[in-house]
Image (spheres, rainbow, N blue to C red):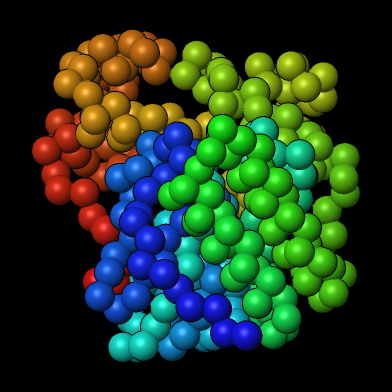
Amino acid sequence: MEITMPNLPITSWQEKISCQIIRNDTQLDRTHLKTSVNSYVYALFEHGTVKIKFDKYEITAHQGDLLIFPPHIYPTILQASEDYEVIFLIVSQSFVYDCPLARSVYQTSTFSLLHDDNPIIKLPEEAQKTLREIMMQIMNHINYGHSYTAEALQALYALMLADIMAVIDQFNNEKKISQSAYHVFIEFNKLLRHHFREHHDIAFYADQLKISPRYLSMVTKKISRLTVASYINRHLMLEACWLLKTTDHSIQYISEVLHFADQASFSKFFKRLNGQNPLHYRHEQEPNILGPK
């Protein structure tokens, strides 16, 4: 039976999870989450053809395709047919950390990184229907919640991950990453979430995990394709961008909150990663990251 897509209001649950249907006449609303670029994005392509750019790659997705974007990967819709329709599920890292299948989050989200030659997960018809049903259930619970919405959303998200993993395992026999490596990466992310403002050095995180900096570097690079320093810097940049755009804190104050030596060091760091100084960024119009140009 074909499932119709109701025109539900676009909302999110506690700024942690958002599910939206995007068509040719709509754009993804990212205002409900603190920052979508620090979240996991699941894109299920329902109809039409969509050309997407992420990282340095450009790919074309069709009906039945699934794309998963880990944090810090900025997907942009470059071109789309008039009949395109995509279901976007955006899940913040804070929601992910509470997920009972957190390891599966990392395993599914790294698929596009480990298969950059063909990052699209082509879903069998039944898997596509199942995933659509789960996403619609998530959307319904977001919009028409109850006192157990948190538990319901966590259960639905875990169910979705399990179904995605079942598909991935059928053709993901190469580039395997050990469970111990995923455990290290998960624990590193948990530490980073709480300490990235104060600690910008790899030695702190390696010491907390009781492993060598070299091993932490190897695991992080293999799973995320980023060095530990780059990973920490991206967290700092996302937080800096959030503070600059959503608060009236001075640049001096922001540099202190993020534990830079002084305002000049922070401004130099920001310009190196962002291409402009903090003041210019604060007054610049934010671009559409997920939506047709």
Left or right for 55, reference 1: left
Q: Nearer the viewer, residue 72 or 91?
A: 91
Measuring from the top left, give residue 3's x and y in whole percent. Answer: 55, 78
Q: Quadrant of the N terminus?
A: bottom right
Quarter residue 219 falls in:
top right
Report the front residue among 123 and 226. Answer: 123
Q: Residue at x 73, y 42 (%)?
A: 102
Q: Is residue 217 above or below residue 30?
A: above
Question: Visible in this render: residue 16?
Answer: yes
Residue visible at 69% across and 58% down in the picture: 160
Q: In the image, is residue 11 above or below residue 265? A: below
Left or right: 63 in relation to 11:
right
Q: Residue at 38%, 37% (x, y): give it.
A: 34
- In front here: 170 or 129? 129
Of residues 264 and 10, the one drawn nearer to the viewer in this rendering: 10
Report x, y in % for residue 170: 85, 74
Residue 144 drawn above or below residue 213: below
Q: Position of residue 203 (x, y in %)?
A: 67, 20
Residue 223 appears in the picture as rendered: no
Residue 66, x across and y down, in percent: 59, 72
**Location of residue 84 by image quarter:** bottom left
